Amino acid sequence: MSTAKAATAADGLSVDDGVRMLLLLMPRMVGRVKRIPVPAELQTLALAPRHLSLLSYLLFDGPLTVSELARRLEVAPTTVSLMIAELSRREVVVRSDDPADRRRTIVSITEHRRPSIDAWLSRGARAWRKTLQPLTPAQRKLFVDTLAAYEREVLTELDA
């Protein structure tokens, strides 16, 4: 083993080795996540990834305003309003006026859909919690920041 290889092995992975491993890991991981069965009562709703992100926020953080959902999802409020309208017609979410400010709309998951959505999305949450638990807060931040940077780079490559 060369000195460069020995140093890399002692410190972790070389960039090329990391890239190689991730190029093999990511398709497997995505494939396995896609195989998580959608609960029968949700299958006819044709939920898209954009809906899952919105539902995840509502499930884990509780009812939110349209503007807060837009900020978190990094999309325009009109886009969130359209998604909410779709989900509302399918009786997945319900809109209500904010009692503190009637101009604002609060969105929440309907009570009859909550158990199915919770059972479905909590699988991923449990896997992430188990994966992230042994890491330090700084390591967790680095991991999340790295995934976000990867997403940005993939988008940059697609736009090029």
Image (tube, rainbow, N blue to C red):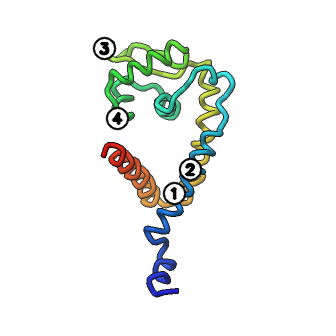
Label 3 CA crowd tier, 10 Å (few <14, some 14–19, many 20+): few
Q: In the visual, does 10 lie left or right of 106? A: right
Residue 63 position in % (x across, y down): 46, 25
Which residue is label 4 attached to? Answer: 74
Question: In terms of depth relative to the viewer, which is nearer, 129 or 148?
Answer: 148
Q: Residues within 10 Å of mark 4 (few under 14, many from 20)?
A: few
Q: Dot 1: few (<14), some (14–19), or many (≥20) neighbours within 10 Å?
A: few
| Residue 23, numbered label | 1
Q: Amino acid at mark 4?
A: Glu
* Residue occupying the point 32% across, 43% down: 159
Along the viewing direction, whichever of 41 and 110 lies nearer the viewer: 41
**Label 3, on which residue?**
103
Q: In the rendering, at what x and y percent does residue 136 appear?
A: 48, 61
Secondary structure beneath label 4: loop
Q: Nearer the viewer, residue 112 or 82?
A: 82
Check contact, mark 1 vs mark 2: CB within 8 A.
yes
Question: Which residue is labeled 2 in the image?
Answer: 27
Which numbered disc, 4 or 1, marks the residue closer to the eye?
1
Mark 3 and mark 2: span between their CA atoms? Answer: 44 Å
Q: Looking at the image, tell me whether mark 4 or mark 3 is earlier in sequence order.
A: 4
Q: Amino acid at mark 2?
A: Pro
Q: Is residue 153 visible?
A: yes
User: Gap between marks 4 and 1, in whole Å?
Assistant: 27 Å
Q: CA distance from mark 3 to mark 1?
A: 47 Å
Residue 46 relative to residue 81: left or right: right
Q: Nearer the viewer, mark 3 or mark 2?
A: 2
N-term mark: 4 or 2: 2
Q: Secondary structure at mark 3?
A: strand
